[in-house]
Amino acid sequence: MSEREERAAWLALLFGGQIRRPAAKAALLRWCVQGNRSAVDLLGQPAQELVAALGVDARHAAAINAAAQDLDKWLTVADGLEARGIVTVLRADPAYPDVWLQRLPEAQAPYVVFAQGALELL
């Protein structure tokens, strides 16, 4: 799994329209942030595993699986952002601002930040 694929998987889940954003954030929090696993692996899980591991219902598990179908589209989007010098900072990245983690409730924290320039200024 590459960093490029990981970013595309987060984008697919959060912006692909297959699953509502609060549900996508909850899945990414449990699977990636707390579980220290990749979003690419999350998209590759059978629905039964998602139900058991994340505590989601079958409908949400199916929506997560549906997001995997658009991964190539989101790889293209991620490549386009990178080509324009736009960095995608994920909630699980070391570059994600610590102050946001301390001050924002999890539900309000952005899970993807698009930035250009000096990331240390975030």
Image (cartoon, helix red, strand yellow):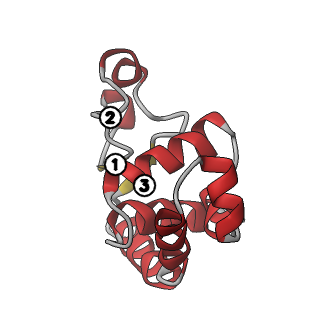
| Numbered mark located on residue 53 in the image | none
Cα–Cα gap, marks 2 and 1: 7 Å
The residue positioned 31% from the left and 31% from the top of the image is 122
Residue 46 lies left or right of residue 79; in this view the side is: right
Residue on which disc 2 sits: 107
Cα–Cα gap, marks 1 and 3: 5 Å
Q: Which of the two labelled residues, at mark 2 and mark 3, occupies the earlier sequence position?
A: 3
Residue 38: tell me if it is visible.
no
Q: Position of residue 100 (x, y in %)?
A: 34, 24
Q: Which of the two labelled residues, at mark 2 and mark 1, occupies the earlier sequence position?
A: 1
Q: Amino acid at mark 2?
A: Ala
In the picture, the quarter occupied by the N terminus is bottom right
Residue on which disc 3 sits: 24
| Numbered mark located on residue 22 in the image | 1
- Asked if the residue at tag 1 contacts the one at tag 2, i.e. Cβ–Cβ closer than 8 Å, the answer is yes
Asked if residue 83 is positioned above or below residue 27 in the image, the reply reads: below
Q: Position of residue 65 (x, y in %)?
A: 56, 74
Q: Position of residue 18 (x, y in %)?
A: 38, 73
Please identify the quarter of the rendering in which residue 103 is found.
Answer: top left
